[in-house]
Image (tube, helix red, strand yellow):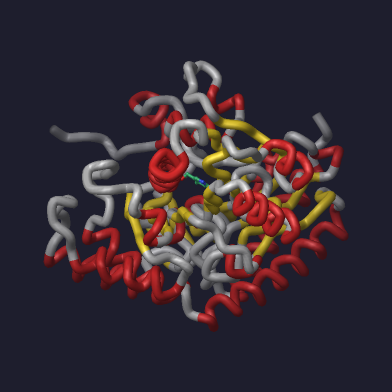
Amino acid sequence: MNHPPVSRALFDQIMVPNYAPAAIIPVRGEGSRLWDQDGREYIDFASGIAVTGLGHAHPKLVAALAEQAQKLWHVSNVLTNEPALKLARRLCELTFAERVFFANSGAEANEAALKLARKYSADHFGPDQREIIAFTPSFHGRTLFTVTVGGQPKYTEGFEPLPPGITHVPFNDLAAFAEAISDQTCAVIVEPVLGESGVISATPTFLQGVRELCDRHKALLIFDEVQCGNGRSGHLYAYMGYGVTPDILTTAKGLGGGFPISAMLTTTAIAASLNVGSHGTTYGGNPLGCAVANAALELFSAPELLADVRRKHAVFMAGLRRINERFGVFRELRGMGLLLGCELAETWRGRSREFIKAALDECLLVLVAGPDVIRLAPALIIPDELIEEGLSRFERAIARLCAQPTP
Ligand SMILES: *Cc1c(COP(=O)(O)O)cnc(C)c1O
């Protein structure tokens, strides 16, 4: 059959309408730049939602993928494989972890973490310690369990009945958390830096306090570093910057640099509760994903790269402050490493999506984190020239928005 070329219009005809993608279709990427079907070039401050932390088509990741593709794609977990074992060993060397479970997405890593916490509690403390505490706002994925733990009504409405035993407490509110935690609490899950929910960092006192109260009540502490992990915060994992160690850590997004892979890290004692047959996934620990993640981890764990992420944070903040001095569209500029949030000023509240559109018109990709925050998550290796060029495009986009008559 002879088909016409595919276009954005086709999306609306044949895809389930749960997404509303932008008008362009990128066809190629290199480093921090993308090209669309018409050959227009874009600077990427989005990284596919904090995923392509090493840019597009990094030669070392391409080589790792191509090399593994010639050898072995998939064997299932009936067998183990070399790339998975190498990746797990390296993750244990670099972090608090002694045991690793691989899956394919952030939600699945969190699902595994939450199930492990329940199982561990059942094994050690009996049937009364089942409650999971999470914070609002937060985001932990879209499976029914993780979306319920995330606690945002707009993501759970219509999907009821929801799994029970989940309590929500305001983020960064240690007093409210101290009220909520009890000997019925089996686990607490927290994003050290809120990603989807506005790019807000946990305060060190909050994370330390949560750690202490979890210890006192024998509740497991889970850090969801799906977004803030893998070098994005300027530390390999954000917990290292805080000096607060979780019992279980989940990560995904940047881990495979664009190849779908996620991991749950924990200790030997806790891992023991996921005994043979208790949990699993067909693709988790797939040789292709693990080979790419091995190459990615080697790059984004390098101390020089992490130091450069912290330096680039300052470059971005200075540029954003300059833009804001001219236009006053932001009430706060914040974030950690190369996960940056620009909270809109009062007059612009609720209009973050207009900034995505305006930036796209200037050939720049940015993200939002809710209706009031513009989120930037460029590649960790973005060159300084592209930071400056991207910020100039951002400034032009904002100038254009400000020149429009207010609706
Ligand atoms: C993106 C994200 C998830 C979900 O990851 P998926 O790969 O989309 O399932 C979970 N937690 C956090 C903090 C995230 O940013």
**Dividing the picture into quarters, in which one does residue 71 lie?**
bottom left
Determine if residue 40 is in view.
no
Q: Residue furthest bottom?
A: 304
Residue at 36% from the left image edge and 30% from the top image edge: 10
Q: Position of residue 133 (x, y in %)?
A: 60, 38
Is residue 301 placed above or below 98 in the rendered structure? Answer: below
Q: Quadrant of the N terminus?
A: top left
- In-image side of 220 versus 310 (left or right): left
Is residue 105 placed above or below 88 in the rendered structure? Answer: above
The residue closer to the viewer here, 84 or 331, is: 84
Q: Position of residue 252 (x, y in %)?
A: 43, 54
Determine if residue 223 is in view.
yes
Q: Quadrant of the C terminus?
A: top right
Residue at 36% from the left image edge and 54% from the top image edge: 271
The residue closer to the viewer here, 304 or 317, is: 304
- In-image side of 62 versus 210 (left or right): left
The residue closer to the viewer here, 379 or 109, is: 109
Tell how many labels.
0
Q: Position of residue 346 (x, y in %)?
A: 86, 39
Residue at 22% from the left image edge and 47% from the top image edge: 276
- In-image side of 233 versus 323 (left or right): left
Q: Position of residue 201 (x, y in %)?
A: 69, 55
Residue at 39% from the left image edge and 58% from the top image edge: 269
